[in-house]
Image (cartoon, grey):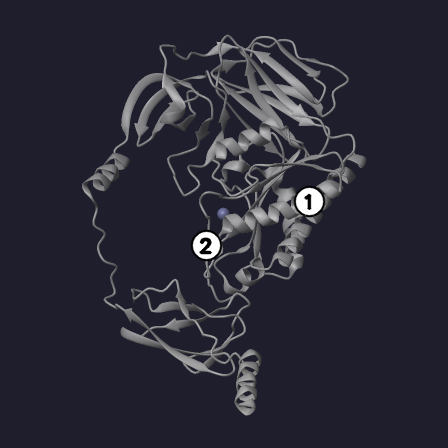
Amino acid sequence: MKRIISSIALLVLAGVLFPANAEITFRALEHRDTVRSPKYYFLGATEPGNTVTIDGEAAKVYKTGAFGKEYKLVPGNNVIKVNISDGSQTVEKEVNVFFKADGRMPERKYSIEEAKRKIDFEEFKERSFYVETLPNACLQYGTGSDRLGGSKMGWLNPGITLKVTGEIQDLFKVQLSENRFAYIAKEYVKPTPKVTRTVNSNNMSVFNNGKSDRISISFPERLPYVSWTQLDPTIINVDVYGAMNNSNWLIHRRDLGMIDYVDVQQPESDVFRIVIKLKEKYAWGYAINYQGNTLNIDIKHSPEEISLKGMVIGLDAGHGGNPGAISPTGIREADVNLSIVKNIKEMLEAKGAKVVLSRTDEYSIDMSSRRKIFLDNDIDLLVSIHNNAGGSPLVPMGTSTYYKYIQNRELAACLLDRMIELDVPNYGLTGNFNFALGTPTEYPNALVECLFMSSLPDEEKLADSAYLKKIAQKVVLGLEDYLKKVKKARQGK
Ligand SMILES: [Zn+2]
């Protein structure tokens, strides 16, 4: 009896020490049964710590449990043999991939609705009537529509009359001046009995308005405008369409904070240009708004103290509601973005900055609402946080930063220089990036695509909360570098 009990005890003890029958699991990730290209990435996942061979070759198992191998498939069925071991037992799995090597993609079948849309797109219809802009109207250069929308020229205030000359899908083509056309989404305009005509500009003044310098010009009606910045020296240009220069007085007050001088030009008979030369190399943003029929261009002053202390920093965690990119083992980009943003927020607040978030939890919020939060809170700078997808899942893909307007290039560059200190590949600095949150001119802004959700080595890092803190530290250092540059440039002026 005694002997039996001790035997049982030994067996129980052995079970605790050697849990030999813990189950080994295997999941094929992003697997497709039939493919049409010979290049195939086989990805799988098991418990982290297991060892894996694929077709007899050892494969790296990431801390997420993911592993993979690149294949050049042969036509017909391909069998991938996976052996997984936890040290005491081994399981063997087979995965089949059929490579359909008929050389052609299957012909795309259009539904009647799709076919109709396709024809509509090819058929531009001429139109002639007038519309008035509604809130959130944005001019775009052309009809292009990549996933980020047509390339944006700039936002317009409501109440501006535009002449429609044609329509194509959900866009109107509008005539800004004799030679300048643009496109605008139909949903952001409404028909109006008003018409446009070329008018004279009226009084103009330039004065210190407290937190900004203001250029005020009145017109008989609200006219469309487009602005852009040139560097070295820093000049902000605003073209007002349908106006002739009749502003015969241009008084400059001597107490301006940011503006060196303002000039007016008439590059075309119906285009009135306001040229604003800044005193400082780095602008802090500008806003263009109508008050009645008076166009106010507000050029933000530099903060007195250029440091994070006291500054209002906007942080945007990409996605929410929608997951964004999903990593091979199922991590949602929206969650990773929010974790990084929360880390940055904590670090910035510790340095005395005030932080404004576009999203504080897992919920959906559209781009206009995000933009409104940042404008309403009068932020000084914005950083958007995303993570990328694409390329090979088997190699580190790295980090990249993005800006739309040239005045934001330096901020994006400072962020990238710090991010690559994480010893990840430099995926590049991208300009003219048509991201919705890159389009406001009211504050410097940049987007960081920290790493790639789709890459197994990058995913392993993004799955590690300590690593997300490291990313946040680099973003904070990048912001500080930018502020140092701005400060230095101001002292040297
Ligand atoms: Zn994203």
Q: Is residue 104 left or right of residue 336?
A: left
Q: Is residue 309 above or below residue 237?
A: below
Please name the residue that numbered disc 2 is placed on: 326
Q: State the residue in front, 422 or 461.
A: 461
Is residue 293 shown to the viewer in this render?
yes
**Occupied quadrant, residue 447:** top right
Image point 46% across, 61% down: which residue? 329
In the image, taking residue 70 as reference, residue 107 lies left or right, namely: left
Q: Specify whether tag 2 is near ligand 1 (CB below 8 Å).
A: no
Q: From the top left corner, tell me how far across and down residue 82 is, in percent.
A: 41, 77
Residue 318, placed above or below residue 219: below
Q: Amino acid at mark 1?
A: Glu
The residue depicted at 42 percent of the width and 71 percent of the height is 26
Per the image, the residue denoted by label 1 is 346
Locate residue 327, reporting x and y percent.
47, 58
Please tell me which of labels 1 and 2 falls first in the chain: 2
Mark 1 lies within 8 Å of ligand 1 (Cβ measured): no
Residue at figure coordinates x 52%, y 85% from the top left:
8
Q: Quadrant of the C terminus?
A: top right
- Asked if 462 appears above or below 3 in the picture, the reply is above
Q: Secondary structure at mark 2?
A: loop
The residue closer to the viewer here, 437 or 402, is 437
Categorize mark 2 by other alpha carbons within 10 Å: few (<14), some (14-19), many (20+): some
The mark total stands at 2
Q: Nearer the viewer, residue 262 or 454?
A: 454
- In the displayed structure, does residue 292 sit left or right of residue 79? right
**Viewer-closest of 40 and 140:** 40
Cα distance, mark 1 to mark 2? 26 Å
Q: Mark 1 or mark 2: which is in front?
A: 1
**Amino acid beneath label 2:** Ile
